[in-house]
């Protein structure tokens, strides 16, 4: 059964372009398109989609309507996943998205729209209750850390695994991406959490949030 999508984007040309792009994917079905926060919430209520794909800034205020939609839907329709598209490499936006929980939430830069495979991966992940954070957000947080940060204790391979975790990938997917065994991934993940002093989280979407919160909270 196709994943039912509501698409929200205030630019008509961008909205239509994304809708046509998604229309080429047999596993996806765009059931409504919207241009502002009000019409988005109304469409979710009437169409009951599996996932909302929304721009971060839309009318009426053009501030963080995508984040606000995710916040409201967490309370009103918790089963609906939300993928927020943004042109801002701003960790604070990603953290705001995860404030009410990381399950079924993704924050991607708009440039990822050009990579259909990555966009579909995020949609599929949130539809299944997973979580995805754009790699550039993780890079911004990692690069802001001082040499005294526990991040400096991570090996190059552990840093690669850390970035893969933030993408919402499970151990099997990380193993495939890095061409290593799943058992090795498990060892790296445990080592990462131990070095960072982060509480172990077996759930994929929870460990995405744990890693992101650690990176944002650690003093520079």
Image: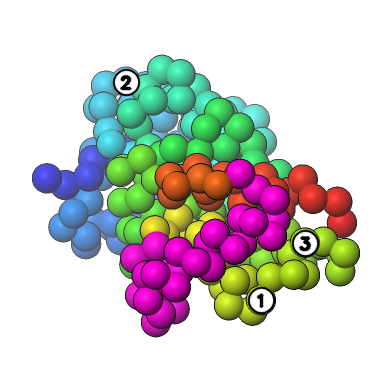
* Of residues 17 and 25, the one drawn nearer to the viewer in this rendering: 25
Q: Is residue 173 magenta?
A: yes
What residue sits 37% from the left and 70% below the top? 182
Give the alpha-carbon distance from disc 1 to disc 3, as whole Å.
Answer: 11 Å
Q: Residues within 10 Å of mark 2 (few under 14, many from 20)?
A: few
Q: Residue 10: x, y in percent?
A: 49, 42
In the figure, residue 6 lies in which quadrant? top left
Q: Is residue 67 visible?
A: yes
| Residue range corresponding to the magenta coloring | 171-199
Q: Is residue 174 left or right of residue 213?
A: left
- Name the element at disc 3: helix
Tell whether label 3 touches label 2 (CB within 8 Å). no
In the figure, residue 180 lies in which quadrant? bottom left
Q: Is residue 132 left or right of residue 141?
A: left
User: Which tag, 1 or 3, sits closer to the chain's start?
Assistant: 3
Tell whether label 3 touches label 1 (CB within 8 Å). no
Give the alpha-carbon distance from disc 2 to disc 3, as whole Å.
Answer: 45 Å
Q: Residue furthest left?
A: 1
What residue sits 70% from the left and 56% below the top? 196
Which residue was labeled with disc 1? Answer: 155
User: Which tag, 2 or 1, sits closer to the chain's start?
Assistant: 2
As drawn, the label of residue 150 is 3
Which residue was labeled with disc 2? Answer: 45
């Amino acid at each position: 059964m196709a994943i039912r999508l509501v698409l929200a984007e205030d630019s008509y040309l961008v909205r239509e372009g994304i809708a046509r792009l998604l229309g080429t994917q047999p596993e996806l079905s765009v059931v409504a398109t919207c241009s502002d926060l009000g019409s988005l919430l109304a469409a979710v209520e009437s169409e009951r989609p599996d996932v909302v794909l929304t721009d971060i800034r839309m009318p009426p205020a053009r501030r963080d309507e995508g984040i606000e939609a995710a916040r409201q839907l967490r309370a009103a329709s918790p089963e609906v996943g939300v993928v927020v598209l943004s042109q801002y490499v701003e960790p604070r936006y990603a953290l705001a998205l995860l404030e009410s929980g990381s399950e079924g939430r993704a924050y991607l830069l708009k440039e990822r729209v050009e990579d259909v495979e990555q966009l579909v991966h995020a949609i599929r992940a949130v539809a299944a209750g997973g979580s995805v954070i754009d790699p550039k957000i993780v890079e911004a947080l990692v690069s802001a850390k001082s040499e005294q940060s526990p991040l400096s204790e991570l090996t190059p391979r552990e840093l690669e695994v850390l970035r893969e975790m933030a993408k919402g990938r499970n151990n099997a997917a990380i193993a495939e991406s890095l061409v290593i065994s799943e058992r090795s991934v498990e060892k790296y993940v445990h080592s990462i959490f131990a070095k960072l002093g982060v509480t172990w989280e077996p759930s994929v979407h929870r460990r995405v949030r744990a890693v992101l919160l650690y990176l944002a909270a650690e003093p520079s």
